[in-house]
Image: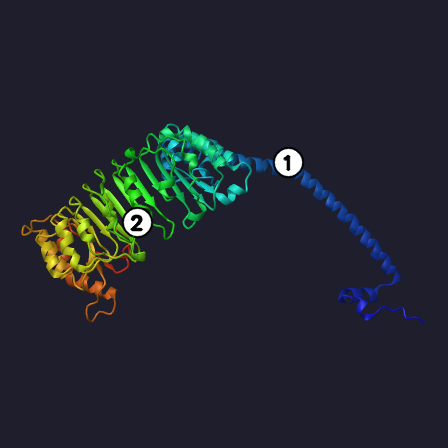
Amino acid sequence: MENTQPDDEDVQPLTPHQAELESAMSDNETILSEEARLDATRRLAGSQRAVALLDEFLREPLLRRESELSLIASYRAALAPQRKLPNELLSNIFAHCVSGLTEVPATKDKAPWSLSYVCSRWRQVVLAQHDLWRRPLFIIDGFQWDCRVNPGRRYASLMADVLSRTGRSMLSLKFYFKRGRQGDWELRHISQCLISYADRLHELSILEKAGESQDFPSDALNFLEDIPFPNLSSMEVSVPIFDLPAPFDWLRLQHLELANIEIGVVPDFHMLRALLSQCTSLLSLTLRVNLPTSPVSGIPAVMPKLTDLVLYVGNVNGQIITSIFDILAFPNLKQLVILEDEDAIWEFGLTSVVIRSGLLSKLYVNFYLPDSEWDDLLAGLPCLSEVILPWGSLMTPSTIRSISHGDLGPSLTKLLCEASNSLDLFLDMLEVRMSTMSHGTQIKDVGLIFDHLEEGCSSPDAQLELEQWRNHPRVMELKKQGVNLSLFRSGEVAVDEFVFPCEYRRTDMYDY
């Protein structure tokens, strides 16, 4: 006979309580247990009906409570202090919040877009505050452009919406092209939009992402050719300047920044000279271009009104810094900044071309200056009031003594340079300049960079602490006379972005 008993694995073990009930129950007890189960089930149903009644009874009070809490929150928001601010003060707060460019397109979490989503009143104030929208950054992304239907028309519509919020404010527009090119017929929609606002445009930037020059064809900017710019005074360009087809009034420009970010390509300096010769009203010029490796012949173009010049220079493939001064003349230059791009050196003859600008009052160079050039440089620029040479060589004792009596740098008021392992020579110089023994001006702001250790000092920190302790009385006396003296370790001076007057103070310096 077939065994019908279940396997041991199929039998669920009884809990101790179940085993006890099963062994103890008689037939009568089984009947009583069933009745008890039914009775418990009826009681449970009654409890559930009671709970349902309570839920129904409490539903309305709970909803009413949520409504009252929401109403109280609304009243609190309506009575919040910021609600009482007048629109004029609110506008000033918004102006401080939005200090940069307005990105287009942008996400809702970026100002000023985010401010317009807080409440209806804030939106009205933001839309009516024209200055918040007068500096848009239009990002034209080739990848996103290719993924959209009619991108030029849609982008022009968005651009028109932003520019319509500027009222009659003068505009500062920045275009940023990246990742590929856009069809000319698409960009024509942007051109049609800009024509209506061209008379209010006084600053224009046309930039491309670094390293993508090969994706930027010469005809990509043809959409600008039909736009007049009658009031344009400032321009920043990192695309090839000669590809700009717009009828710019170069004579009106006052500020120009040119960059050539295509690696290894040197612009035609004869064409650059011809272009800049038209910019006779320029006050400031920034050049970040690859310099020629051989001298440029011809007569320099005179820039009669230029006062500020910033040059980014390097020594890749033997680029010649003096070539800038071969093609341009700056008879009224007041401020000169020369920044190192890569491996720049103070080449032979650079001092002689720099001192042609006899009116130069502020000089900043962030790469090595040979100690043999100090005397010639200071002697040739008697109007210098600020000299910032954070990575220059040490001045010789004779140069420092000549500065003391005003024979060199007679107009100096601010000096940042490297120092030897002692303050003594510089303190002597400052004390003489503060006295009647010198015919030079008083030097009131001095920063000294220590890159040399005195014998017995284990670290630059120890060297600086020793100098502070040893010269404290003299320094405090100079401080009483209005001299501000700061000491730095080498490598601690932030000079990536330099603007006169020099803001070189930092929290990690030793300040008397």
Q: Specify the amino acid type for callout 1.
A: Glu
Residue bearing the label numbered 2: 497
Please tell me which of labels 1 and 2 falls first in the chain.
1
> Quadrant of residue 455 in the image?
bottom left
Residue at horizontal 33 percent and vertical 38 percent from the top: 235
Q: Nearer the viewer, mark 1 or mark 2?
A: 2
Residue at horizontal 36 percent and vertical 28 percent from the top: 199
Label 1: element kind: helix
Q: Specify the amino acid type for callout 2.
A: Glu
Query: Seen in the image, is 46 located left or right of residue 492?
Result: right
Query: Mark 1 packing: few (<14 Cα in 10 Å), some, or many (20+)?
Result: few
Q: Could you tell me residue 262's position as x and y percent?
A: 38, 50
The reply to whether residue 512 is in sight is no
Q: Could you tell me residue 196's position as x and y percent?
A: 41, 28
Which residue occupies the extreme right position in the image?
Answer: 1
Whether residue 397 is situated above or below residue 414 in the rendered picture: below
Tag 1 near tag 2, CB within 8 Å = no
Query: Seen in the image, is 173 located left or right of residue 379?
Result: right
The tag on residue 5 is none
In the image, 184 versus 13, the foreground residue is: 184
In the image, 175 versus 216, the foreground residue is: 216
Q: Could you tell me residue 320's position as x and y percent?
A: 26, 53
Query: Seen in the image, is 26 located left or right of residue 216?
Result: right
In whole angstroms, how far apart are the C-alphas of marks 1 and 2? 65 Å
The tag on residue 60 is 1
